[in-house]
Amino acid sequence: MQTEPFDFDRPAAEGAAARRVRARLDRPDGQARAWALFAHCFTCGKDNLAATRISRALAAEGVGTLRIDFAGIGEQTLAAMPEGFSVDVADLVAAARHMTAHGCAPGLLVGHSLGGAAAIAAAGDIPSVRAVATIGAPFDVAHVLRLLGPQAEGLGHGETHTASVGGRPVSVGAGFADDLRMQDQKARLADLKRALLVMHSPVDQIVGIEESSAIFIAARHPKSFVSLDRADHLLSKPADAAYAANVIAAWASRYLDGIEAESAMPPADGVVRVAETGAGRFQVRVEAGGAMLLADEPVSVGGMASGPTPYALVAAGLGACTVMTLRLYAEKKGLPLERAAVEVRHDRQVGQTPPDVFERTLTLDGTLDAAQRASLFAIAEKCPVHRTLEAGARVVTRAETAMAAPAETEHFAQMETACETQAD
């Protein structure tokens, strides 16, 4: 597992100033099966034990997870000064946009304590999210006021109130209580339209089990409840955090395409499998040759720009075939080609025949003379994908799920033929 900084700038929102959001991304070893966004508890932060343990445990299950510091919490040594519930929700939405822009749109929201309530509130504004899991979350977000004491209510402008919550001093200002009271979680749960997992300990001394019961009753199916028996509110025991993460990952597998795909048979040799991920309008998962990547469309046409466009993939095929053909030819002819590279650009020229143009720019490194360079440029014109694009190809569409796989040796045989027929 790899942990890396994933900070981003959040624009001004809900009356809060723009700020730099501190975040950590826990990546699984190998290809991520899915992506999650974790919301920490009221007085915690992204580096809190529960947040760290659950995030890393999810990553160990193949679910890459981002954890962020809510506004006013962070890595401060002084009293935490949370800006408000609405700002927390805005932070989550901004974090999801940042993840989406980097090709890891979250399909799962996980929230601990008040972070669970924030996850429920944010889910409707994050299109890629298909499942929400809460841990020890309150139904009534104004429950926090009980922890802060009656002095937290009715503060005047410029006034603050400080209380100890979970052993940490927390200061709140005017409007904090009003923001909590205006939240309608019942309506949000009724209109969630996402799968919901409610996890709670019956011995939780901070948020009572009755809060999770209210969440479960207000939500519509699909919904599930799992008891975190004997666990405390902060999941201070590593075994409790690991258990919660394992259950979340297993439960989410029914709702997240990426996890479902893990159990499916990989495509046969020579077959490319493309399937929608459910994130955004156009994002698809492409599996080929034991590798996986995302393809998408630009933001300007409604995509998320989370991967190459279909035409970029065609250009990539042309570029890859060109470089491979150059290498094969150089080896056969004993040419001192140290490294070949190609840039491919696609353009559509309306009114021209054909309208689509792929422009290649070759870079050939090595002590090559003019004649050798000319021969390499000539062989590039004979690469199999180049010939296919110029000659055209038939596309046969079938309804069957099984697809016949063309032998890879046929593709390389075309390269061999091109090299053999090319004059010195």
Image (cartoon, grey):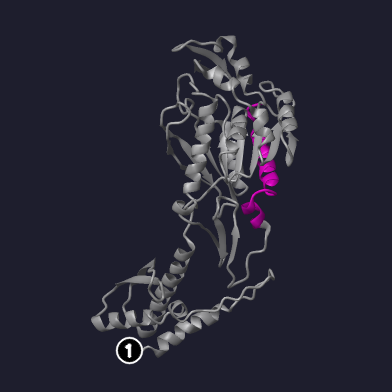
Magenta region? 233-262
38 in magenta = no
Amino acid identity at mark 1: Asp
Secondary structure beneath dot 1 equals loop
Q: Main secondary structure of the magenta part?
A: helix
Q: Which residue is mark 1?
A: 424
The residue located at (40%, 82%) in the rendering is: 382
Residue furthest to the left:
370
The residue located at (60%, 57%) in the rendering is: 276
Residue 63 visible in the picture: yes
Image quadrant where one finds the C terminus: bottom left
In the rendered image, the vertical position of residue 178 relative to residue 412, given as above or below: above
Q: Mark 1: few, some, or many residues within 10 Å (few <14, many ≥20)?
A: few
- Return the x and y of residue 150 as percentages of the image width and height: 59, 10
The residue located at (44%, 39%) in the rendering is: 7
- Return the x and y of residue 106 as percentages of the image width and height: 56, 45
Q: Quadrant of residue 265?
A: bottom right
- Return the x and y of residue 401 as percentages of the image width and height: 68, 68
Residue furthest to the front:
351
The residue located at (64%, 32%) in the rendering is: 188
In the rendered image, the vertical position of residue 9 relative to residue 307, given as above or below: above
Q: Quadrant of residue 131?
A: top right
Residue 46 visible in the picture: no
Q: Is residue 346 left or right of residue 245?
A: left
In the rendered image, the vertical position of residue 78 relative to residue 364, given as above or below: above
> Which residue is more in the foreground, 9 or 409?
9
- Return the x and y of residue 214 as percentages of the image width and height: 73, 27
> Which residue is more in the foreground, 327 or 225?
225
